[in-house]
Image (spheres, rainbow, N blue to C red):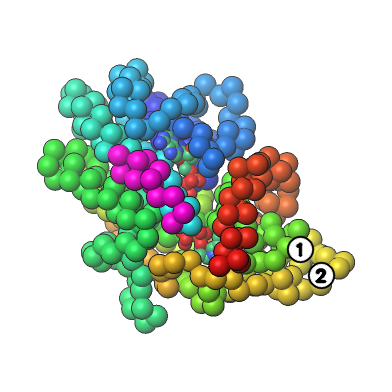
Amino acid sequence: MNNKPILITGGAGFIGSNFVLQWVQAGGSIVNLDLYTYAGNLENLLALKGNPEHELVHGDICDGSLVAELLREYRPSAILHFAAESHVDRSIASPDEFIRTNVQGTFTLLKQARHYWSSLTGEEKEAFRFLHVSTDEVYGTLEPDAPPFSETTPYAPNNLYAASKAASDHLVRAYFHTYKLPTLTTNCSNNYGPFQLPEKLIPLMILNALEEKPLPVYGDGGNIRDWLFVEDHCSAIAQVLAKGRIGETYNIGGNNERSNLQIVRMICGLVDELAPSKTIGDRSNLIRFVPDRPGHDRRYAMDASKIMREIGWRPSLTLETGLRKTVEWYLEHTEWLEHVRTGAYRDWIHRNYEERAAR
Ligand code: NAD
Ligand code: TYD
């Protein structure tokens, strides 16, 4: 690992903070630009307090002059772009921020990255990369017996989050083809693991199961996602950065397709085992079917054979092991959970579930 820093955006969020911790622990240096939105949490980075290899910068990726200044000052060897509005339910309720951060923000970064890269020479220019972190949702939804998404599956986003990420992927592609900016794009399936906000399925269900609250399953619970432990996603990104071919996209996934109901039942079993309840008995009694998400994609699945073949990446954990580790992590981090459940978080839970139930 060279000692030049990389610039990462969104490194106080769920996946970004896991990446930052992994990168610095492996001896790397990072400048971390994050707006600290509701999803950005500095507590995720407490282990790096005072560590000179991690420089936190509070700011917006849509602020072109700030991005230009950071590039001039730190001369990073790469930009890793994680920052985004990332929650589908929020994109249905209020899409504006998704267009601003995911589309305008990515464009601003690309523009400044191109300017910076053009100013480099020799080895520095040769080595520079812009790595864009994206999602499987850009491909839309799969029929039950269709093959998984590959890198050549046509884009067909069905919700505002997916559409804004698809737009950002297209901008990255165009910067490579038009200006030869050395880009890499990764599209990953659903992540789970430490530091994920309990607005997403897995941590929400762990938390509600622990507190013996209803477990709200959208629709019939038959929607399928392909789950990957977050640290395996981070290791895939680091390997694509090191070995990926410029201009290429790489699909990342754990080959772990499960219906939401299967996932919720697995969580119930783990919580029953690790934190037995005296009153409720079997937590799956708490499962409640609630009105569905509009435009709810039925099935996602990733064909990750390209990254495995070309880069040699493999996930390190099975879903069973990863979920167990995750439930244990949430059981051990009650203070972190307390702190993320602020007033704004409670407002969102009210808006998404109480209003859904009243529909
Ligand atoms: P997250 O919502 O947990 O974190 C997003 C981070 O970006 C936060 O720290 C937030 O403060 C920051 N941010 C938001 N707007 C910003 C702005 N304008 N300027 C600077 N920082 C800003 O998201 P996540 O789940 O960690 O996802 C990270 C990336 O990975 C996203 O690009 C997402 O599309 C992609 N992705 C996520 C998943 C998943 O399952 N969570 C799967 C595949 C891909
Ligand atoms: P989510 O974690 O929001 O991720 P994404 O929408 O990016 O896949 O949701 C995962 C799946 O779980 C999705 O099919 C919606 C479903 N879901 C529920 O059934 N109940 C919930 O309370 C949440 C948050 C999600």
The circle drawn on residue 212 is 1
Tell me how far mark 2 sits from mark 1, CA to CA: 7 Å
Residue positioned 73% across, 75% down in the render? 285
Residue 136 x/y as whole percent = 37, 60
Residue 318 x/y as whole percent = 55, 64
Q: Quadrant of residue 188?
A: bottom left
Please tell me whether mark 1 sits on a helix, a strand or a loop.
loop
Q: Nearer the viewer, residue 246 or 354?
A: 354
N-terminal-most mark, 2 or 1:
1
Q: Nearer the viewer, residue 50 or 134?
A: 134
The reply to whether the magenta stretch includes residue 100 is: yes
Residue hosting label 2: 280
Kindly give the residue lying farthest to the bottom in the view shown. Answer: 145
Is residue 32 shown above or below 177?
above
Residue positioned 22% across, 39% down in the render? 182
Q: Are marks 2 and 1 in contact (CB under 8 Å)?
A: yes
Kindly give the residue lying farthest to the left in the view shown. Answer: 178
Q: Give the magenta-colored segment's residue range.
A: 92-104
Residue 129 x/y as whole percent = 28, 37
Q: Nearer the viewer, residue 127 or 214?
A: 214
Residue positioned 60% across, 66% down in the render? 358
Q: What secondary structure predominates along the stretch shown in magenta?
A: helix
Circle 1 crowding by C-alpha within 10 Å: few under 14, some 14–19, many from 20: some
Res 124 seen here? yes
Residue positioned 55% across, 71% down in the render? 291
Residue 171 x/y as whole percent = 23, 45
